[in-house]
Image (tube, helix red, strand yellow):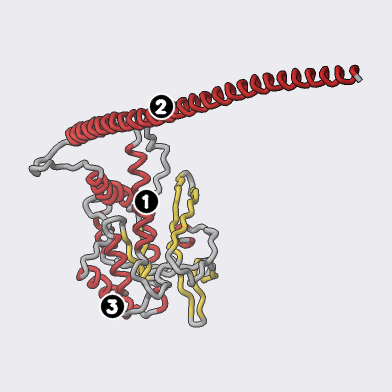
Amino acid sequence: MDSLFNTNFESSPSPHTLPTVKLKAHTYELQESNVRLKLTIVDTVGYGDQINKEDSFKAVVDYIDAQFENYLQEELKIKRSLSAYHDSRVHVCLYFICPTGHGLKSIDLVCMKKLDQKVNIIPIIAKADTISKTELQKFKSKIVAELQNNGVSVYQFPVDDESVSEVNASMNAHIPFAVVGSTDFVRVGNKTVRARQYPWGTVQVENESHCDFVKLREMLIRTNMEDMREKTHCKHYELYRKKRLEQMGFSDVDADNKPVSFQQTFETKRSNHLQELQQKEDEMRQMFVVRVKEKEAELKEAEKELHAKFEKLKKDHTEERKKIEEARKKLEDEIVEFNRRKAQYQQMGQSHHTLTLGKSKKK
């Protein structure tokens, strides 16, 4: 990417020991003369490093779908501001192929097949200086044949525009591009060029006789950038949007397979939604009435129990009071009887004392 945009993007190499694939996105503000570009580079860290590569593509697919979903949610807002929205959708996937010379790996075919309806794929043979030109041409032909045999669609530069149709048609014949990248600059003659220095010679990144880097840069940045943006929005995003709207209940055809407008679908969906709300409201009202009745029955039962307890306590209180009254009356009777006997004993004691005194005088 440094070679492609002639910029030193600060990035640290990622380890090849990660258990899963992770995607790291970095956004940069680039400017050349009066042209400004907001570029987001998404790096698939750990892709293809696992022993089990069955789900290696899933993280990439999920990321692309997540960006589509974010854009869709912005579109569905009542107050949307797409002009100020940062479009994070992926407009192109540069799929780097290992220069084995034997053809595509299974993971390459599976991943590109999963991605070809979601993003513009441009296959690229990385480190093209590691194989000879003859092997490279055979490798390219084999890759194209394998892509066609497996039904993988890669991005084709448009030929419907007369101003670029000829150059795009010739560039389509060079796919997949064989490129060489470098962050080093080497002195070649009177010029300092971006190149890779080897004991046997120098591979210049921007020399078209050495690799297809210049062709890739011209097609990707200068000629077809807007077409890739348009194709992403009009094809890949619309496919995702159509699928999501169908999941929400919106469709282009009715039950009889007749075309319907979005407004009709919306009104039908709205009517069905209102009916569901009314039905749920009726169910909740009935449930509320049932619960109120159940609560009233519980309260009446509780009131009945409290009344029974009150009557029992009242009865117990009356009986206890009656017992106390009887005990008090009995005690009063005992006191009266005690006082009566006490008075009798006192009278008897006085009589006995008088009698004793009389006998003493006679003597």
The circle on residue 138 is: 3
Front residue of 76 and 10 = 76
Question: Would residue 320 appear left or right of 167 to someone viewing this image?
Answer: right
Question: Would residue 348 appear left or right of 142 to someone viewing this image?
Answer: right
Binning the other alpha carbons within 10 Å of mark 2 as few (below 14), some (14 to 19) or many (20 upward) gives few
**CA separation in Å, label 3 and label 2:** 100 Å
**Which amino acid, mark 1?**
Ala
Nearer mark to the viewer, of 3 and 2: 2
Identity of the residue drawn at 29% across and 68% down: 110
Identity of the residue drawn at 78% across and 18% down: 351
Residue at numbered disc 2:
307
| Horizontal and vertical percent position of residue 279 | 22, 33
Binning the other alpha carbons within 10 Å of mark 1 as few (below 14), some (14 to 19) or many (20 upward) gives some
Quarter assignment of residue 97:
bottom left
Q: How many marks?
A: 3
Disc 2 on helix, strand or loop?
helix
**Which amino acid, mark 3?**
Lys
| Horizontal and vertical percent position of residue 90 | 37, 53
Residue 231 visible? The answer is no
Identity of the residue drawn at 46% across and 45% down: 36
**Which amino acid, mark 2?**
His
Disc 1 on helix, strand or loop?
helix
| Horizontal and vertical percent position of residue 235 | 25, 50
Which image quarter is the C terminus in? top right
Disc 3 on helix, strand or loop?
helix
Front residue of 344 and 274 = 344
The circle on residue 66 is: 1
| Horizontal and vertical percent position of residue 32 | 48, 49
